[in-house]
Structures are given as C-alpha cells and as structure tokens.
Image (tube, rainbow, N blue to C red):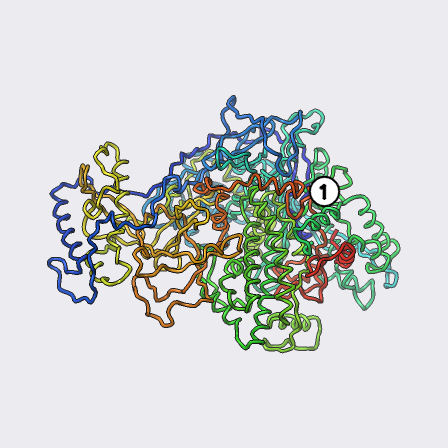
C-alpha cells in the first residue's frame, strides 16, 4: 500500500489464543480506493397480494353459462342436495340454511388491516445527499455511550436522510469519499432460499447485483502475460474450476465444467498440452520455495501479494537447581508457517472487488421510529458503527500526522481468531490455524463462507512429543512436571505471536496514533458488582510487568522451580503467570496506551451456550434423576419423549430432536441452543411445586437473556433491557442454587461417570471403565463459582463499545475449519502444513487473476433467489390440484370446519376484489359500492366452480434488523402455524392472533355487482385457517416471565375457522404443545373434524417467543427497527432511560454502571491458549495443558475437584474480604 503509515491496536478474544478485532489505524493512499459508483435506490411500496388478471378478453356469452351453472351447483351444495346431473348420494348431515345475508353474518374477527400495517420490504440505508445539500445537525441529543461530548473544536456533523425505517447515519468531520452503502441493494439484504440449479420453476425476475458469475464475452481478450502461468484462457478456466471448486465434486460442479467445455470458444487443444502440475506449483509458490518457482509467480511482489513464510520457533526451558542440568536450555519447537500481517492488509486493500464493500469512515447509526420522538435512539450493530471504532477514527484525525504526509488517515479493524481442529475423522492429523477478518466489512458478508473473506495468517505449532525426551534428558528420569509442561506451552504460544508481531508490524504500529479499545456472578448486575468490576479492573501497567519480570528472574537466573514459593508469592496476589505475553512485551513499551486487559471481548457460544447453559441443563438432568429415584417415576424418559415431539421450525432454526437428549450424545453448540429455546414446554410439570415454577422462571430469564445478548441489531433501549435481564439472571441463578438445588441430592449422570472412569484409565488408573449403570457415581452439586458465570456481566458493555456479539462471535472461526479440512484432502499427508500454505496461495492467486482479467465484465446473479424478495409472499400459479366447490361442500357436509366456509370465503374476497377494481387503470370506480353495501353472495361468482390447492406458501418478511427473510408454510407439515396482527390498539390485549393453516388456495373470482364494467376474472389467493384462542393473557409476557398459552377455539364456534388474505400474515410461528396438560383426546380418531384433524389436538399450547431473534423482537412491540407496523406503539422510554441513567450514574451497563471499562479477563483458566471451552475443540484439550476436566465429553466445568475458577456466584453474599480470598484462590491468568 503505497504511502501508507499505520498503527495497530489489539483486542484479544477470551481464550488466550483467540485474538479479535485488532484495529489498524493508518493513512491510506486515496488512489488505492476504487471510485464510488451510483448505487441502486429501491422505491418501497407496501406489498399487496399478487393478482393476475386472467381471461380479460372473455366474452359475456362465455361467462353467463358459467355463472348459471355455478349458481345451481353452489345452491344445491349449500342445501345438502346433489347438483343437477350428479349421481345421488346419501348423507346423514343436515345443513340448515341461515336466512341472514353475508353482510349480516360477517365474522367479528378483524382480518383486514390498514395499509400501514402491511409488510415493508427491507431497504438499505439512504445515500448521502449530493455535495452542497448536506444535512448538518447542530442540535445533538445526549452523547451516546462511548462518545465524548462535543467541544468547540468538534468536527462538523453530517446526517444522511432517514430511510423508510427511520434509520439515518451521522458522520463526523468531512464527507466520506467512499460509501459502501451505495453498493447494497435488496439482494445484499435478503437471506432467502436459492433456486436449485436446473429448476423448472417459473422464471423469477433477477434482482440486479454486483456479485455473481462474470460474462467474459464482454471483457477485453486477455493477453498471455495476464494468463500466466496458464498458456491460454481455456486452461485458466479449467484450472480455476479445479482449484476453487473444492476437492469433492458435486452435480453443480459438474454443470459448471460442462458450461466451460460446452462454450463455443472452447478448444480441446488448448488444454491438451497444458502442464498442470507446473502451473499449480507456480501458483502456490512461497518465500520458502525454490527461487525458480518464486520468480515465476505472476503476483508475487505486485498488489501486495502476501505469501507464506517459514520461521523457526525457539523457547527457553527453565530447569531448577535440583534437576540434573539446572538452568535455562534452548529448545527448537519446530517451524511456524505464517504470513506478514502488514502484507495481508496491503493485499486486502489492493483487492478492488472487496474494496467497494470496505468502510473506511465510521459513522453512528440512529433510529427515529416516530417524527415526534424526543431524541434519536442510538443503534448498535456493525463494528464500524461502534463507539470504539468512531473514537479511534476521530482520535486519529485529531492527532498530528507523519511529517511531510498529507494522505487521508483511516482505521482498519483486524479480527483474529484461532482454534485447533482435527483434519480427519480418524488419525491424529490436526491443525491450529489463525484466521483474520476485517471489521471494516459488514458482519453479514463476513458470516457467509461463500464470500471467502477469511484470511489464513498462521498455522500455530503445539509442543512436540519429543519435548518430553528433551526435558527428561535435563531433569532426570522423573520427567517434566505438569507445571513445566503448561509453562512451556504458554511460552511456545507467545513465542509464535512474537514472530507475527514482527519489526514491520511494530513500525506500522508506532508511526501512528493508537486509541485502545476497551468481570462477579455473586452480585451480577448489582451496584456492588459494578463497583467491584470498576475498582478491580486490571491494567497492563509497568508494575504488573515488573512482577512478571521478577518472577522470571527467579526461574531463569536463580533456577527456582515454577511452583516455588517465591514465584507463587510474587504472582499470586493478582493471579499472574511467569510468561511474557507477546502483546504486552511488544506493544505496551511503545507508550501508545496499549492495555492487554482492555482487549478482550465476550464469547457467547463458549461462555453461555457451551458454558452457563450447558452446565445448568446438565444439573437439571441430575435433579430429574434424583427426583425419579425419590418418587419412582422416570421423568427423564418423559423429558426425552417431549423433546422428540417438539416440532421443527424454519429451514434449520429448530431441528428435530431425534435422539434422547438426556444422553447428551454428539451435541454441538447449536443443539444446546435449540434445547434452551424449547426447554419451557418440555420441563413444565416434570417437578413438583415450588421447584417447577422456579425452574420455569429461570428458563424464561435464561432464554430472554440469551436472545437479547445474541441480537444482531441493538438500540440503547434494548441494551437497557439486557442490563435489567442480566440482573434478573443473577438473581434467578442464585435462587435456583439456594432452593431447588438444595432440595435434591444429585449425583453424576451416567455419561459423566463413564467419562471420569475413562479419564482415570487413560491416566494409568487400574480401574476399568464402568458400564452406564455403574452405581459408583459421585455427588455433584451445581457450581456457580465459574469464570463463565462471571463474564455474563460484560455483555451489555461490550456491545455498547464494539457492536453486537455476532460481529465477533467465534462461530465463523469454527465454520472456517471446513476450509483446511478440504485442503488437507489434496495434500500427501506428509509435511501437510507446508503444502496447505501453498494451496491457500494457489486458490487466492488464481482468483486474483480472474478478477484482473475481467474487472469490468458484466456480472449476473449466479444464484437467483427462488422467489422475488420484493413480494410479500409467493404461492404457485399451478392449477394441477383443482377442487370443485360443489362436491367439496357436499362430501364434507357435517364437518364443522366448513360450516361457514362458503360465507367467509366470499366475505373475504369482497373488499379485495373491489380494491383491485379501483386500482385498475382506466376503470371508473365511481359506481362501485363499499364492501358493507354489498351482499358478497350475490355479487361474486367464480369462473368454473372450483378453487385450486397449493402445498407451499412462502412468506417474505422484513426482520427487526432490516433483513429480508422467509418462512415456508405447509399445511401438511408441522410448519403450518402463522401469526397476524390482532388489530387491537389496546396494550392490555394480545398484539397477535395465531392460526393453523389448513390449506393454501387461489380462486378466479368475477365481480357482477353494481358498477361492473366487464366480466374479467381475478386471480385471488386465500388461506383457510383454524384459529387459536389465547389463554390467561393477563398472567403472561415479560413482566410475568411466562410464555403465551393458546388453545384451539371450540370447533363448533362460528368463527373458530376463517378465510384470510395471505398478505396480512406476518410470518410463521413456533407453537409447542403444553405437554403437562396432555392431549385433548385419550384415543386417536376421536375428533369431530377430519378436515381440521382435531383428533391430534392438545389441550393447550405454548407460543415460543424465543425460537429466533426476530420473534423475540416481535414481542418487544415497538422496538424492532424493521417492524414498521409497531413503530407507532413504541413505549416512551426516554423518561425511563433518564431514570435509569440517574440511578446508574450514566453508566452504559447494568453490569458496569460507573462508566469504567470492563475487565473481561478477571481470572480465566491458565492452562494454555485454549482455556476452558467445555470440550468443544476438535483437538483434545490436554494438548494445551488442561488440568481440569476439559476432556470430559460432558464438558462440565462445575466439577468440585477442579476448583479452577474465581468463585463469584455462591448462594450467599460475599463481603469484600471474602472476594479477595476468592481471587487469591483463583487460577493464574495467562498473562
């Protein structure tokens, strides 16, 4: 990057090997940026039901016979008679004709909503106004969290126009010259199913996009130099297909190959003589390869090609005075394959295809849901809209630049993550990669592996097996101690990071301005908890570094043992370890304000889903086992059976629980998340009162906290909710431990007992592993004294500083493991790390060649959406499944489901067909009556007396975070429940109505009433729905910590069924039986309606608030940014927030209310870089020095034997003295 000077700031993940969000601040040559292009601005209109006019040229003579026959058939069917000409049939049912008109028999349920309640299609943020028309805001509201108040020298403020959702951006300083939002359209906002390749479905208009396949025919013909190392274009295309198509070829991959060789320009002679092996070796050449290969590399040294390097790793091993050879000894641990961090940054900024999505200038995002709102609400989401990023950018602009340099200065955010993984299902091949993402890119793009935005920057080495031979040689036959092994693992880890933080990196760090970005469950969320977190926040200062240096002098110069009393006394007070942290050692002495302890961010997956929730769920299972032994009822089997009956939801949101969940077999983080989201209906009633109520309340609070912590878009209001729920969670956990847990004597689960015995056997114990029914299980209590409970208080503050948790979650890193596993298949298995480094370069370089060859090529949507995301819904137009109305009504006579079907259908169609006529261009609507003035039975007829059935309804909806998502409704599956707005303006009344879809149909209706001008038929769609009634609404919701309960309306009730317009459906919903109430009928086939299948009814159902994050925000009515229909009902939180700010001293979090920065590093485990991850790593934890029970498949961190974590969450209130004692007992922190 020519003319660039940069400075780096590190934020490290909780686990010592997980570094997240290192921020590089530097000056970027403007010439390196691509020019901004005109983005596509979408015109948003409320979605209405799709109507296809059919037979508009039909003659009246063709229609009248149809009308005449229709009237006869329908009238006969209504009277229970056979239509003219139909064979006679016997029926026991008697249908009594209602003499009232359709208008008089109108349902009392509100099924049509005003236009303002209809779905609003997701839209990007508004573009900035043209130069000279900027909106400057001199009247700022209260300063947002993390943003300093304005001063006289404060930069100018530029606001963008509000979009349809009330969102606008606020820039500080100069107008941005590059705006990635211009390149964002509906395709970039939609997360809908992709149409299968070769699908014969109807053609959907393509949504214009800047991503997809390149039409090379419109690009200039490539020269031989630009194709190097391939001799011609066809060879390049085949090579690109082979390299970037993955090792396993699929049908889709085959079609891509056929497309290449089937092209008119393809000539077999072009590829027949290509030297493929040579070309691939040149593409994968690195600095450690032969000079001949490096010289032939087409990209090396150009455009910042960051190739791989090989550096030796050496550590000093201390042997104490009682060893055979005392003193420090050098040990060569192997070679580190890595890439220069600075070169990776240069390579990224030189990539024009990614550059247009790269946010160089941060902004603050605000929301004005209503015009008369007192002050705009701050929105938290992307890293580049976070206070930390904005502060870093502003500080960089205010600082004096480098002498003689006038280039624009920007901030680049590096997000690093590392985690070891097995490369094969069998064998011991493993890899410890370090991944890098750029926080300047949207988290929605980073989270999609197909965008290939993850950079591999290093493959870490672990302590080799030969180290024990080396150590035994110097310390004697007893071999190295566990503490020595742990120490050497730490030393090895930080020695490799010192290689990555090389002189080039330090030069970039020093010559710039750095603004550093920013832990007690016993009092979680309480004022005392806030005070303790503030007063005891760690600082990586000179005093601490001197303590570590003094301890190392004891070890390396005076030859004392690592576990000696002098070393312990020096470090134990603040829980340090005698390891030189690479970041502290390299960056802190530069005097630029780097503080290691302000660098850690939260890790929701490992800390909560695989930590707090997993340990809680396991202890609930222990309680159920204890209750079963006490009462003689197998409630664990009941739990398994209930989970198996929970319906799935979405494409993969909630999956079927096919196995016995109590056995905890092969459960990943997503499985534990599903268990939590569905736990309330399953556990309800399994234990007696008062324990049942306490557990249900705890589960509700856990689910609510988890949903809030995992939101992809937060506002200041929702973060206040997270603060409050954090306090509630601490209270509920302490109550659970003090009451429910104390009432039962709990033992290990059979799986835990078996795992413990296997560990003993592995460690040389003589006892064989017991069977599942082994009675020698140990007592097991619920342990709140864990570091993961302690970290829960950091979430709201971290989100306020760095954006939402999905931006820095470890899930993308876990998913990225698929890449090295696929590359490993293409290696020989020997020295595979070196080969994988070459494979990475090969894939990257051939992609760069493609991008350079066709920079201006026309780009088409390679994977079109299955259905147009602009539409509210999609129902097929096929007429392959017609249902004749007369036979349908006659054959089902007596079934309560069709008691009012005919009348409800016409009543629903009446206003819709009138609205359609009024909207028809050229139609004189002056003669049309209002729907209330018409008898639909008289003015609506059907072309052909039939309607047409469809199995699938696709509902597109705009989520709370302004993304376009889709639910699929299938009346023949468990995905058949929907929710609509109730239309009630009363806050005490339910906001939503719920129904089960019995069928999806379309009909061709003809209007023959007053004001008709033709006999055109109109394609109208409708849903046949069975309604739920709400039960006990006054005792449900957030205040009562209870889910809404439903039951089906009495089947003989007039309005228990209904016909609705699909356009009023908000989305699908997850409704779970209330298992404790039992089914409605004791025997199958006892129901009254086979059409409604009521024989399978349960007495009551739960509405699952927590099935996904969008659903949670539906119930926080008014707080979903994308839920425009609710904005008018948003509660007035301005006064509440002022009250909260007053009581919290304007602190940004209920967990850190004093305004200080959190210390997320209080006392994490010290057994190496992996820390405690509850057995989720693909590599055995013992590889990284775990001394706790991390190899236990149960992943339980509450084992009373471990005692490894700071105890901050007992069932009593600790005083300050006891807190200090607990801190002293905690494990050493990996400094």
The residue under label 1 is 502
The x and y percentages for residue 133 are 50, 23
The x and y percentages for residue 398 are 68, 29
Q: Nearer the viewer, residue 573 or 461?
A: 573
Q: Is residue 664 left or right of residue 1010?
A: right
Task: Name which residue lies at 81% across and 64% down.
Answer: 473
Q: Nearer the viewer, residue 241 or 890?
A: 890
Tell me if residue 835 can be seen. no
How many numbered discs?
A: 1
SS type, badge 1: loop
Q: Is residue 425 left or right of residue 1122?
A: right
Q: Where on the picture, by quarter, is residue 476?
A: bottom right
Q: Where on the picture, by quarter, is residue 1078?
A: bottom left
Tell me if residue 456 can be seen. yes
Q: Nearer the viewer, residue 747 or 824?
A: 747
Can you name the residue that lies furthest to the top here?
132
Q: Vertical placement of 634 versus 1009: above or below?
A: below
The x and y percentages for residue 369 are 49, 37
| Mark 1: few/some/many CA within 10 Å (<14, 14-19, 20+) | some
Q: Vertical placement of 684 versus 1037: above or below?
A: below
Q: Vertical placement of 79 versus 665: above or below?
A: above
The x and y percentages for residue 1148 are 64, 42
């Amino acid at each position: 990057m020519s003319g660039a000077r940069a400075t780096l700031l590190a934020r490290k993940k909780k686990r010592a090997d997980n570094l997240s969000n290192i921020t590089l601040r530097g000056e970027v040559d403007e010439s390196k940026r691509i020019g901004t292009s005109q983005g596509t601005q979408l015109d948003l209109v409320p979605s209405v039901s799709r109507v296809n006019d059919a037979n508009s040229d039909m003659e009246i003579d063709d229609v009248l016979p149809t009308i005449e026959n229709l009237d006869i058939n329908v009238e006969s069917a209504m009277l229970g008679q056979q239509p003219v000409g139909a064979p006679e049939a016997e029926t026991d049912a008697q249908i009594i004709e209602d003499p009232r008109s359709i208008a008089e028999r109108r349902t009392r349920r509100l099924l049509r909503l005003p236009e303002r309640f209809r779905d609003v299609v997701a839209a990007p943020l508004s573009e900035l106004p043209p130069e000279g028309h900027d909106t400057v805001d001199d009247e700022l509201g209260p300063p947002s969290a993390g943003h300093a108040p304005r001063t006289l020298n404060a930069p100018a403020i530029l606001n963008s126009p509000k979009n349809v959702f009330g969102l606008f951006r606020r820039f500080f300083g100069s107008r941005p010259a590059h705006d990635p939002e211009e390149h964002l359209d509906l395709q970039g906002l939609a997360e809908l199913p992709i149409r299968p390749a070769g699908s014969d479905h109807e053609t959907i208009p393509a949504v214009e996009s800047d991503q997809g396949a390149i039409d090379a025919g419109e690009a200039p013909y490539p020269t031989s130099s630009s194709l190097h190392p391939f001799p011609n274009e066809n060879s390049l295309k085949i090579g690109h297909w082979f390299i970037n198509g993955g090792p396993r070829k699929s049908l889709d991959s085959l079609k891509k190959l056929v497309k290449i060789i089937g092209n008119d320009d393809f000539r077999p002679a072009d590829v027949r003589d290509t030297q493929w092996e040579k070309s691939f070796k040149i593409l994968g050449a690195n600095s450690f390869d032969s000079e001949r290969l490096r010289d032939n590399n087409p990209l090396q040294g150009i455009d910042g090609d960051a190739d791989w390097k090989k550096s030796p790793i050496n550590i000093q091993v201390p042997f104490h005075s009682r060893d055979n050879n005392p003193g420090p000894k050098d040990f060569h641990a192997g070679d580190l394959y890595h890439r220069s961090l600075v070169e990776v940054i240069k390579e990224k900024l030189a990539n024009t295809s990614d550059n247009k999505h790269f946010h160089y200038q941060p902004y603050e995002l605000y929301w004005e849901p209503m015009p008369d709102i007192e002050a705009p609400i701050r929105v938290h989401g992307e890293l580049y809209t976070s206070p930390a990023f904005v502060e870093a950018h502003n500080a960089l602009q205010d600082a004096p630049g480098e002498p003689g340099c006038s280039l624009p200065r920007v901030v680049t955010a590096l997000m690093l993550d590392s985690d070891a993984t097995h490369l094969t299902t069998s064998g011991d091949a493993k890899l410890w990669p370090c991944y890098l993402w750029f926080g300047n890119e949207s988290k929605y793009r980073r989270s999609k592996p197909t965008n290939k935005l993850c950079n591999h920057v290093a493959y870490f080495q672990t302590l080799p097996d030969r180290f024990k031979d080396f150590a035994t040689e110097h310390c004697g036959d007893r071999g190295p101690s566990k503490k020595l092994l742990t120490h050497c693992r730490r030393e090895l880890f930080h020695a490799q990071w010192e290689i990555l933080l090389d002189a080039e990196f330090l030069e970039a760090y020093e010559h710039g301005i750095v603004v550093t970005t920013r832990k007690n469950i016993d009092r979680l969320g309480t004022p005392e908890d806030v005070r303790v977190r503030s007063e005891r926040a760690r600082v990586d200062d000179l005093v601490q570094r001197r303590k570590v240096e003094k301890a190392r002098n004891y070890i390396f110069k005076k030859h004392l043992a690592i576990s000696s009393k002098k070393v312990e006394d020096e470090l134990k007070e603040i829980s340090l370890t005698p390891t030189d942290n690479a970041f502290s050692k390299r960056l802190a002495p530069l005097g630029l304000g780097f503080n290691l302890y302000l660098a850690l961010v939260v890790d929701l997956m490992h800390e909560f889903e695989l930590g707090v929730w997993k340990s809680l769920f396991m202890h609930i299972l222990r309680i159920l086992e204890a209750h079963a032994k006490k009462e003689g009822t197998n409630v664990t089997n009941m739990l398994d059976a209930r989970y198996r009956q929970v319906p799935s939801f979405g494409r993969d949101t909630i999956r079927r629980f096919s196995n016995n969940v109590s056995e905890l077999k092969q459960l990943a983080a997503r499985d534990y998340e599903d268990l939590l989201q569905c736990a309330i209906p399953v556990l309800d009633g399994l234990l007696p009162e008062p324990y049942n109520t306490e557990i249900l309340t705890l589960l509700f609070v856990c689910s609510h906290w988890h949903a809030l912590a995992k939101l992809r878009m937060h506002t200041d209001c929702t973060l206040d909710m997270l603060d409050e729920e954090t306090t509630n969670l601490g209270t509920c956990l302490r109550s659970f431990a003090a009451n429910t847990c104390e009432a039962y004597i709990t033992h290990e689960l059979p799986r835990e007992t078996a795992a413990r015995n296997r560990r003993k056997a592995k460690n040389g114990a003589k006892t064989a592993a017991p069977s599942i029914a082994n009675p020698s299980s140990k007592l097991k209590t619920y342990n709140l004294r864990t570091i993961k409970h302690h970290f829960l208080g950091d979430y709201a503050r971290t989100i306020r500083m760095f954006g939402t948790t999905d931006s820095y979650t470890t899930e993308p890193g876990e998913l990225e493991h698929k890449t090295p596993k696929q590359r490993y298949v293409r290696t020989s298995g020997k020295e595979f790390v070196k080969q994988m480094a070459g494979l990475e370069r090969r894939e990257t370089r051939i992609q760069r060649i493609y991008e350079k060859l066709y920079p201006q090529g026309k780009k088409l949507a390679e994977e079109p959406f299955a259905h147009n995301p602009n539409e509210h819904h999609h129902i097929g137009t096929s007429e392959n499944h017609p249902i004749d109305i007369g036979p349908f009504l006659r054959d089902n006579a007596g079934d309560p489901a069709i008691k009012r079907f005919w009348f409800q259908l016409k009543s629903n169609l009446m206003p819709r067909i009138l609205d359609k006529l009024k909207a028809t261009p050229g139609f004189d609507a002056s003669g049309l009556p209002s729907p209330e003035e018409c008898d639909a039975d008289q003015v609506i007829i059907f072309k052909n007396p039939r309607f047409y059935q469809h199995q699938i309804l696709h509902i597109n909806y705009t989520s709370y975070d302004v993304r376009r998502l889709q639910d699929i409704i299938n009346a023949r599956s468990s995905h058949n429940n929907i929710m609509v707005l109730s239309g009630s303006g009363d806050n005490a009344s339910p906001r939503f109505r719920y129904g089960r879809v019995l069928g999806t149909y379309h009909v061709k209706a003809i209007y023959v009433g007053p004001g008709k001008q033709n006999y055109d038929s109109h394609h109208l769609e409708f849903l046949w729905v069975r309604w739920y009634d709400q039960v006990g609404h006054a005792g449900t919701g957030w205040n009562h910590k209870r889910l809404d309960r439903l039951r089906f309306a009495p089947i003989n009730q007039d309005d228990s069924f209904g016909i609705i317009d699909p356009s009023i459906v908000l989305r699908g919903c997850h409704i779970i039986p209330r298992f404790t109430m039992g089914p409605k009928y004791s025997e199958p086939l006892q129901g009254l309606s086979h059409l409604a299948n009521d024989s399978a009814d349960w007495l009551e159902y739960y509405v699952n608030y927590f099935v996904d994050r969008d659903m949670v925000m539906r119930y926080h009515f008014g707080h979903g940014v994308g839920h425009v229909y609710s904005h008018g009902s948003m509660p007035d939180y301005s006064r509440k927030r002022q009250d909260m700010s007053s009581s919290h001293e304007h602190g940004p979090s209920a967990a850190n209310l004093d305004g200080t920065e959190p210390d997320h590093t209080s006392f994490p485990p010290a057994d190496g870089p992996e820390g405690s991850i509850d057995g989720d790593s693909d590599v055995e934890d013992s590889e990284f020095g775990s001394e706790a029970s991390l190899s236990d498949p149960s992943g339980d961190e509450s084992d009373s034997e471990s005692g490894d974590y700071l105890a901050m969450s007992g069932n009593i209130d600790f005083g300050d003295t006891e807190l200090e004692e607990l801190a002293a007992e905690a494990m050493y922190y990996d400094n």
